Amino acid sequence: MMHHHHHVSETAETEDAGERRLWLAVAVNMLLTVVQIVGGVLAGSLALVADALHNFSDAGSLILALVARRIGRRPPDAQRTYGYGRAEVVVAADQLDEMQRIKRAVRDRLRERIGVEHSTLELELPGGCGSEDRESSSTV
């Protein structure tokens, strides 16, 4: 009796399935955005509308991930002999940087609105993101 093992890191079929899941996540986020905006307007809830915009932002991030995934599949060429596989890493790093900028803007606006000193209000993103701001925040 013969037994076969197939060791393929990521076939075209699994790549397509991953892409379909990302598009589904985009669609769900966009639908949720619309529902939350309608609900927020009808209920007079600014918080719900704000969360809708957050979901819209998530959909945009997922679209960037899809673009990076497609770029990453390109084969090596004369300019990029290593290929384009790092595109996803570059996009992820850029999104992290953008989250940091947004976090700082929200923190600064909160400080301004509620009138607290910078040392009494610290926001930190999950996973330790933002910890490098602690030292610089004392000078803000």
Image: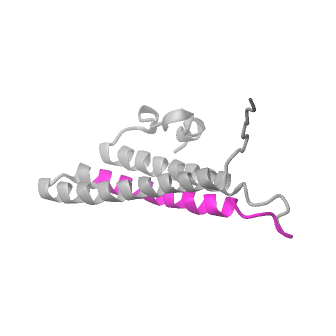
Closer-to-camera residue (56/44): 56
Q: Quadrant of the N terminus?
A: top right
Closer-to-camera residue (20/134): 20
Q: Which residue is at a point 58% across and 63% down the rendered structure image?
A: 67
Q: Residue 59 location, x and y as percent?
A: 43, 57
Q: Which residue is at a point 73% across and 36% down the rendered structure image?
A: 4
Residue 81 placement, left or right of 89: right
Query: How many numbered marks, from 0 up?
Result: 0
Quarter-of-image position of residue 49? bottom left
Residue at the top extreme of this rendering: 1
Regarding residue 61, the answer to whether it shows in the image is no
Q: Which residue is at a point 82% across and 68% down the rendered structure image?
A: 77
Residue 63 shown in magenta? yes
Q: Residue 36 location, x and y as percent?
A: 25, 54
Does residue 115 lie above or below 20 as drawn? above
Q: Give the main secondary structure, helix, strand or loop, of the magenta stretch.
A: helix
Residue 47 shown in magenta? no
Residue 114 placement, left or right of 95: left
**Range shown magenta:** 50-79
Residue at the front extreme of this rendering: 1
Residue 44 placement, left or right of 46: left
Q: Which residue is at a point 49% across and 35% down the rendered structure image?
A: 126
Q: Residue 41 location, x and y as percent?
A: 17, 59
Regarding residue 67, the answer to whether it shows in the image is yes
Q: Residue 65 location, x and y as percent?
A: 56, 56
Does residue 114 lie above or below 119 as drawn? below
